[in-house]
Image (cartoon, coloured by chain):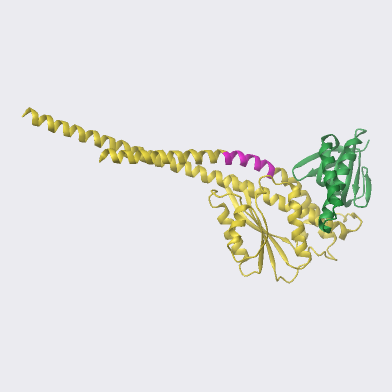
Chain colours: A yellow, B green
Amino acid sequence: MASGNMKDIKRRIKSVQSTMQITKAMELVASSKMRRAKERALAARPYFNTIYQTITRLAAATRDNSSVYTRPREVKNSLFVVIAGDRGLAGGYNANLFKLAAAQMDGKNAQVITIGKKAQEHYAKRAWPVTQDYPGIAETMKISDTHEIVSQMLELFRGGAVDEVYLCYTRFISPLQQEPTCIQVLPARFDAQETEPASGPQVLTEYDPSPEAVFDAVIPEYLYGVLYGAVVESYCSEQSARRMAMEAASDNAGEMIENLNLSYNRARQAAITQEITEIVAGSGEVGA
Amino acid sequence: MATFHLKVMTVDRCFCDEEVDRIVIRTTQGDVGILPGHVPYVAALGIGGLTIIQDGKPRTAAVSGGFVDVTREQTVVLARTCEWADEIDVNRAREAAERARAVLKQHESEHEQNVAQVRFKKAINRIRIAENK
């Protein structure tokens, strides 16, 4: 009986060990992918900051005759662009984002554009109509990939099919911290206060051909930048979340192996003791 | 000689962050030259070349989309795509031009035609810049 118990424990140790090997490998893969993704996310930031500054200045200059992209409208339909991962096993990464998105969509007449395989699978089973799916683009994201998505977004918005557009993604704060975020991208709002020059005369900027035309040309650029940045950050967050989840899994597996080893040794010792007892009892009988 | 600070950026790369003498850039309205002390100016960019003259030596790049923003302090070019002339893969650009031309001949839907036309223009622009460097 004791040897059967030992065999069971041995088998369990083996299975936990092989699982640990997998989680360990996934952790390493995720951390090297995260490093690359982080570089990409950080490289996108200066571009984004500059475009944001310019557009805020532009928005202030064209404030009187507001453009179709900034004018607030009565909201009937909303569009949500939900950026999630392509794979699972990343802790609460996907679930947290979907929870936030669902909270934001609550009470709205929402439709969805999904980015990432997990988002596609999630919304295929939900009541919200899906406009379009873009699975598997995050890892090799290029700025040209955003053109199709943004032009679709703008078409719906300009055509009046949707009156506001939200972007749900996961902000990368640090390798240990990511935060699901939802921002409104259309109609665009820019804080005019920041752009007010602190002192001195207002600089007169020349717009070629006109402020409105430039503004309308810059807005899509801005959206490309925003979308690209959001996808890149989400991807980076996904990898960090996976790395953390896999690290925890490896730790747990190590702990489990330790416990199992302990019980294995106990069982082994119990078997030996029992054998000795049996031998001693037997020899005593023979001697008597 | 007077210079001004120029930044050329795309989403994934910073191409230039230096003092330059002057630049010539293709906006939607045509080529525009920018010299030191230019009046504050913003324009959207078309598909064309960007020539940067630094220390009297020109350097060219193929640029498509984006915009240029000139302020007192600096000039910023935010481009959708940007490549230095010597980085352009001419063969790839030629192939892209061929492909786009084939699509244009097929009389596809209006959307496809537009997409192909833009691709064609970009490819031609790259070839032109690469060969004139």
Q: As drawn, is A163 to the left or to the right of A243? A: right
Is residue A39 found inside the magenta-colored segment of the image?
A: yes
Residue at 55% across, 50% down? A88
Left/right placement of residue A137 relative to residue B98 reads left
**Image x and y of residue A188, in percent:** 75, 61
Q: Is residue A198 visible?
A: no
Query: Residue B33 placed where, x, y %?
Result: 94, 44
Residue B133 magenta-highlighted: no
Task: Report which quarter residue A72 is drawn in.
Answer: bottom right
Q: Which residues are magenta?
A: A29-41
Q: Quadrant of residue A269?
A: top left
Q: In the image, what residue occupies the spot 74% across and 62% down?
A: A186
**Position above or below: B113 against A245:** below
Between B62 and B10, the one lying in front of the other is B62
Q: Residue at x 16, y 31 (%)?
A: A279
Front residue of this view, candidates B2 and B131: B131
Is residue A49 found left or right of A270 in the rendered image?
Answer: right
Residue A287 x, y percent position in the rendering: 7, 27
